[in-house]
Amino acid sequence: MASTFAAVFEIVSFGAIIVLVVLGLGIIASMMGIFNFAQGEFVLLGAYVTYLAYAHGAPVWVGMVAAPFVVGALGFVLEALIIRRFYAAPIVAMLGTYALGLIIRESVRGLIGGFYLTVPEPIGGSIDLGSVHISAWRFTIIVITLVVMGGCYLLLARTSFGLRVRATLENPALARASGISTPLIYGATFAFGAALAGLAGALIVPVFSLFADLGIRFLIQGFVAVMVGGVGSFIGPVAGAGVIGTLSAALPWVMSPVVADVLVFVLAIAFIKFRPQGLIAGKGV
Amino acid sequence: MSGAREAVARISEDVVTGEGLPAARAPVQQASAGWKVLPIVEGLVLMIALVLPWVLQDYLTVFATRVVILALFALSFDLVWGYAGIMSFGQALFFGAAGYGVALLARDLNVTSILLILPAGTLIGLTASLLLGGFLLLGRYPSSVIFVSLGTLTGSYAADRLARGWYYLGGQNGIPSIPPLTLGSYEFEEGPIYYYMVLGILVVVYLLCRFLVRSQFGLALAGLRENEQRIAFFGYKAQHLKAIIFAVGGTIAGLAGSLYAFHEGFVWPNMLGVVFSTQVVLYVLFGGSGTLIGAVIGTVIIEGVSFWLSDNYRDVWPIILGVLLLLVIMFRPLGLVSFVLGERERVGSFGKAPKSKETGHAAP
């Protein structure tokens, strides 16, 4: 019983991490039609900012709060300078963002060297539930993921900003004619997606420690999750991330990890092949 | 149909209308009448390649051999992306699968004869690409470009993970110490002989590819790249054409992979994975996709410069590479070759002038 509970917690906590990483990716893919290959590097940057703050003596949580803003600001600048040119061509956008990601990743690699740098958890210790001990920080990640998810949903579904974003997605020409500044909206959306990635990186760095290939680890999983969930809505990628995250954490409990690892990808691609619209089809939120 | 599919369809439509494709954006420069630049460039490259072993030291010849094999690999990607517009982000899957296949043949069955190894590697590449291409490209609905590119990427990533975790394939370390290729009792050691053999293969494959892309089949492919829908309306089975060229690309990648495995003497998981897959994308984009010589030149330049810089600037080079790539994508979508090669020549002409009976070899 206790071990089952521990396993479930393990699975849920990994699922939450994947959801957190995919949120930004999904928003950019759904709202802008761009598969951002640099997203993994935004995660890495978030982790790096947290590490920097910690290395300079600030409490870890300061870095974690700063990370989304720093990465979001960078995202805004990059969108204005580079990403903007790629909207017409999704494949070129993939390649361009890949190049961007390469630059960021190798720069960070140059800065930290080939090391695995650890950052302590801001909330250490464990929560005891009877005989079960669960990591307090992982529990916090689950809670924050839920809060962020809810916040994003409200932002997109209930605020006037969200309405503008959806209008721009649905019909850019009409949105422009209605007086919405679509370039600004695109910039803000991209920055928002980047900021979410930064937050994800900041939160997971105590769990995975900081190394240059931190982002790549999640990138392909993230893409698959977005496709499985369905491009075009907010909730689709989140659902896909939940499924992929849960599967990749749960399958290794019942079969050899190597097979499980590959099986998740094979299942996901087969699923997308036969249901291209994804789990949850639909536009908007 | 659902909204999400519309979204994806909208994305793919943008691509097939060619708005974003490099070809459409290219500035048309120098319409030099009469002068053909392409054969001159090709001839120059071939001449340089032929005299190379005489001017280089031995260890550099070994390096040059590796570059030639990689150029063969780049050619396979260029066919698929540059000519047919299929973004194969997992081309290394076929390269690495063939490499692993022939490495296993050599390790477990002691097969090292070149007459068996190269056909075996080629066959592995063909089979793997037929299976993956058939699954990703064929079907009731045409697949979106995004799906194909992510599908190939995922396939390659999954294969990488599998090779890393599977003890039989040597795990992280791969399969070391593959014996040299043999022909009868002769052993191909690294060096000028191996170099010329590989160069010969590259030239033959290059000519075959050149014939292919300049045939009526190549014309259909170019149409596919520029406007898939229109090609479909003409009655071509666009998906079949794509699957065929994907398999041709996979076959060449398999050939390159088996040569690479025996040349390096070992295979390791990166050969299958994202690292090599993206590497080959870099070569082709850099040199110029949609021209066969561009793929070769891109490989030579990137590998050459990275070899040259790796002593002193090992850390900075990947960053420079990223910046250069970004600049090329943004400002020179047709790659370096477009500095000397005019638009008219890049597009070229196809096959013989059509006679009265225009069935086209292409429509399967």
Image (cartoon, helix red, strand yellow):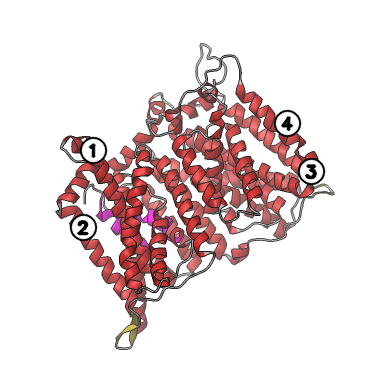
The image shows residue A66, relative to residue B351, as above or below, that is below
Q: Residues at marks 4 and 3, common chain?
A: yes
**Looking at numbered disc 2 in the image, what kind of residue is underneath it?**
Tyr
Q: Kindly identify which numbered label has been placed on residue B47.
A: 4
Residue B33 spot, x, y in % from top left: 56, 14
**Looking at numbered disc 3 in the image, what kind of residue is underneath it?**
Pro
In the current view of this chain or complex, which residue is farthest to the bottom?
Answer: A131
Query: Label 2, on which residue?
Result: A153
Mark-to-mark CA distance, 4 and 1: 53 Å
**Left-right relation of A199 to A212:** left
Residue closer to the observer: B87 or B162: B87
Residue closer to the observer: B2 or A188: A188
**Looking at numbered disc 4 in the image, what kind of residue is underneath it?**
Met
Q: In terms of sequence position, does the residue under pointer 4 or pointer 3 come before the other?
A: 4
Q: Residues at marks 2 and 3, common chain?
A: no
Query: Label 3, on which residue?
Result: B192
Mark 3: secondary structure? helix
The residue shown at (47%, 43%) is: B326
Mark-to-mark CA distance, 4 and 3: 15 Å
> What's drawn in magenta, residue-wise?
A217-246
In the current view of this chain or complex, which residue is farthest to the right?
Answer: B185
Mark-to-mark CA distance, 2 and 1: 21 Å
Mark-to-mark CA distance, 2 and 4: 62 Å
Mark-to-mark CA distance, 2 and 3: 64 Å
Residue B331 visible within the image: yes
Q: In terms of sequence position, does the residue under pointer 2 or pointer 1 come before the other?
A: 2
Callout 4–callout 1 Cβ contact below 8 Å: no
The residue shown at (34%, 59%) is: A70
Query: Label 1, on which residue?
Result: A172
> Mainly helix, strand or loop, the magenta region?
helix
